[in-house]
Image (cartoon, rainbow, N blue to C red):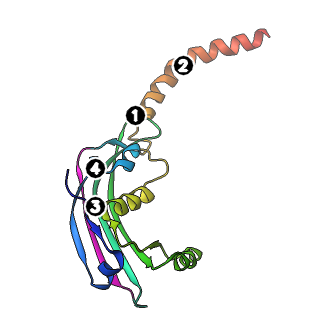
Amino acid sequence: MSVRPIIDALDFARNAGAQHGKIALSGLGRLQDYLAENSGELRYEITGALNRNAKPILQISVQGLIKLRCQRCLDELGHMLDLRTELLLAENEQELTSLDEDESVDGILAEPDLDVFALIEDEIILSLPISPRHDESECSIGSQHNVSTAEQKPHFAALAALKKLH
């Protein structure tokens, strides 16, 4: 298992730090519940900077293919991640509370020992669709539904005849 990168978030942002690399999907424990398959890896980049108001920020970029489970047919569904987010760093709980009031800003508490992979995993989970599904034309349940509907017509006729008896 590779060493998980840890940064001092404020120091990283103020010194314009940058890290990039690859993350194995199998190493992201909380993401496993969302995945149909955990093989493969994602490319990431995290950069520290000061925004136009001289506030420390982290810019996160993640790209790669993950396989989710279609909520319609339960088959694998390829989902291309191209995540780009900017997080404003709050130096204390009070500042974080004031950031939470502004819905146009995403903020986190700046930690001196921030786990980069855990932060990236959080951002991936937040970016996932609530109910991932194939397009209807691609979903296997759609083709099964069409076949079963044709096969079920005699059954509906039988049910209608039963209904007339009562």
Q: Which residue is tagged 4? A: 27
N-terminal of the pair, mark 1 or mark 4, is 4
CB atoms of marks 4 and 2 within 8 Å: no
SS under mark 1: helix
Say which of marks 4 and 2 sits in front. 4
Q: Which residue is tagged 3? A: 63
CB atoms of marks 1 and 4 within 8 Å: no
N-terminal of the pair, mark 3 or mark 4, is 4
- The percent coordinates of residue 24 (x first, y second) are 24, 52
Label 1, residues with CA under 10 Å away: few <14, some 14-19, many ≥20: some
Say which of marks 2 and 3 sits in front. 3
SS under mark 3: strand
Say which of marks 1 and 4 sits in front. 4
Label number found at residue 121: none
N-terminal of the pair, mark 3 or mark 1, is 3
Q: Is residue 63 above or below residue 46?
A: above
Label 4, residues with CA under 10 Å away: few <14, some 14-19, many ≥20: some
Q: Which residue is tagged 1? A: 140
- The percent coordinates of residue 67 (x first, y second) are 32, 45
Q: Amino acid at mark 4?
A: Gly
Q: Which residue is tagged 2? A: 152
